[in-house]
Image (tube, helix red, strand yellow):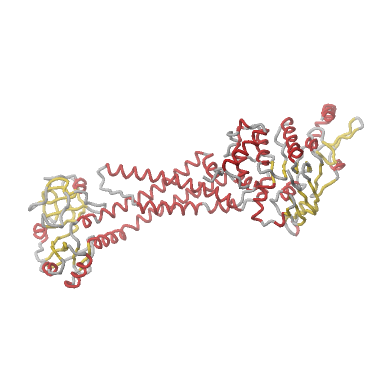
Amino acid sequence: MSGRVPVGRRNLFSERRRGLLGIAGTAAALLLVLAIDAIFDGAMRQITRYIDTQPVQVFVAQSGVRNLHMASSSVPLERISDVANVDGVRAVDPILFAQEGLDASVGGRRLAYLFGYVPGRPGGPVEMETGVQPDAGEIVLDAATADSLGVGVADTVDALGRPWRISGLAENLSNIANGIAFVRLKDFQRARGVSGTTSYLLVTTDREAGRVAAAIERETGLAATTREGFSASEHELVSDMSGEVLRIVSGAAWLVGFTVVALTLYAATRSRLRDIGVMTALGAGRTALWRIVLTQAGWTVGLAGASAGALTFALGSALAASSSSLSFVLEPRAVARTTAISAAVAAAASIAPLIKVSRLDPASVFRR
Amino acid sequence: MDADGIRAEGLQKVFGEGEIQVHAVRGIDLAVVPGEVVLIMGPSGSGKTTLLSMLGAMLRPTSGRIQVDGVDLASLAEKRLPAFRAKRFGFVFQDFNLLSALSVRENVELALNLAGVTGRAARERAEGLLRDLGLGERLGFPPHKLSGGEKQRVAIARALANDPAVILADEPTANLDSKIGHEIARLLRRIATEEGRSVVIVSHDARLKDVADRVLWLEDGEFRSISDMATDPVCGMAVERQRTPHVVHDGATWYSCSPECRQEFARDPMRFIAIMSTA
């Protein structure tokens, strides 16, 4: 507290309706930015959830492949022993992977990552919401995927050109782009007509994962990536593919926010130009005048930011309470980034009013 | 107050160049000592505002110099002028110019803030001044809830906030009725006499002559002899005898500021002569 009369704040709120409208407009723009960030971050976190939750340390794929999304990997089954023989490798589990359409007679179609795995081994669902792991001819769907298809345990869906009975629902794995489904490895091989190859090998090790991955690459020529590296690679690919649209929407929201803040500040300054002229006549230097404009900017963006933060949090809570497959994650770095950009927007929006007040002639106070 | 007052020598202000050059003020010499009230009158466009702006350190003269409390304004860098204005001058305006977003007390406190006085010291000083001027019950009021006289008293409190050597008043009674105008005039007189400040008033209001030690007539940027001036019996404005319409009544010549005032006087001369004789 400087003990000064808060002229900037008084100016901003003396015309309450205009002040509140400016704050509301800015808050709406910031809410849009934060919500887009939260949806994007939630989607990105969810998109790698299958990888992140697997109880393995290294993903092995065909040479050059280091992700799942839109990738095709084929590893001959005889390479399992090559990988297993690498020093430090404790277990190797093959999985088959394909992006498939799941068809339900009642609920339409949904694109899904379909995995073939050996029940009881890595590669399958880590947590079941209901039901059991798949037996022959059975499938496990992610709960949100089942919800979107309108099916449940004991219902039937078509995939890989044949019907599957749903044996259980896995917890929280699907993402905004596609669902997740699991069948037994043998069923997958049979349905696809593949017998001598698999898509990926999941490696369990007690050693440092990076060193083991490097050793596998060196000794087998296959692509071996730590789980964290595999997840990051998946994240980067999807982010690159879908980030552009989100960046454009986010940019538009920032532009709206900037315009609203700029207009609010300019209008608040312009409507008080006479008062500011009086202040210059009374002896206000440039610092005092700038303090007024920047205070107005700070209050506008500060209150708008706090409101937008609260609304985003409320929106996230509402989405969590609903059965939406939309994952909403308000990352601290997104809040920090929005805060930093808001401060920059406030400063940039203050430029025109700052120039205006800097050019005020103190003698103008005598003109009527 | 212990000050030297304000002194201007050879003050000139020229706006524009070549054919559009305007000499707003031409070679003005003026000294106002502490405790003195000087009233500067003159028609519109005579240079009063330009002179006031220069005296108040808001406008640099083209030539000549101004000293306030012994400080030559020309010696001050541009960026030091605001602080100098805040501490050495008090301004009173025709339109009061109170900041509408602030309360009465904050308006006075703001002037103190601008001079570097903040917090409780500023608040107490502002409240003290306002109480002295009879506004103790109005401290938290917004300016729009005050009468014209109250607004001008707040403006005077604001002008006195930093204990300035010089008070510059621009038409301080113009928006006030006769009674309140007299009160404000007497207040300005008291500020000069009791507090030893130099008071310069620029006005059309001839009633302010009553409180002035000296009356100066400014026309075309120069001071003219006040003996050439007369008072319009209708509106009270000071007018130049040689340039204004007049009416002769009972052997006396009465000067008017405009044909309208002359016609009004002609309709009932005795009424206005009676008012003039009691003024």
B142 up-or-down from A30: above or below: above
Left or right side of A353 for B207 = right
* Residue B42 location, quadrant: top right
Residue appearing at x 26%, y 45% in the figure: A324
Q: Residue furthest left?
A: A136
Give coordinates of residue B139: x percent, y percent: 60, 34
Quadrant in which the C terminus of chain A is drawn: top right
Position in image of residue A171 (x %, y %): 19, 48
Residue placed at 27% from the left, 62% from the top? A233
The answer to which of A234 and A88 lies nearer the viewer is: A88
Compared with residue B267, is residue B208 higher up or lower down, i.e. above or below?
Answer: below
Relative to residue A21, is residue B237 drawn left or right? Answer: right
Q: Position of residue A10 (x, y in %)?
A: 54, 41
Furthest residue in direction right, as rendered: B251
The spot of residue B82 in percent (x, y) is: 65, 51
A167 left or right, relative to A234: left
B195 to the left or right of A285: right
Q: Number of numbered discs present?
A: 0
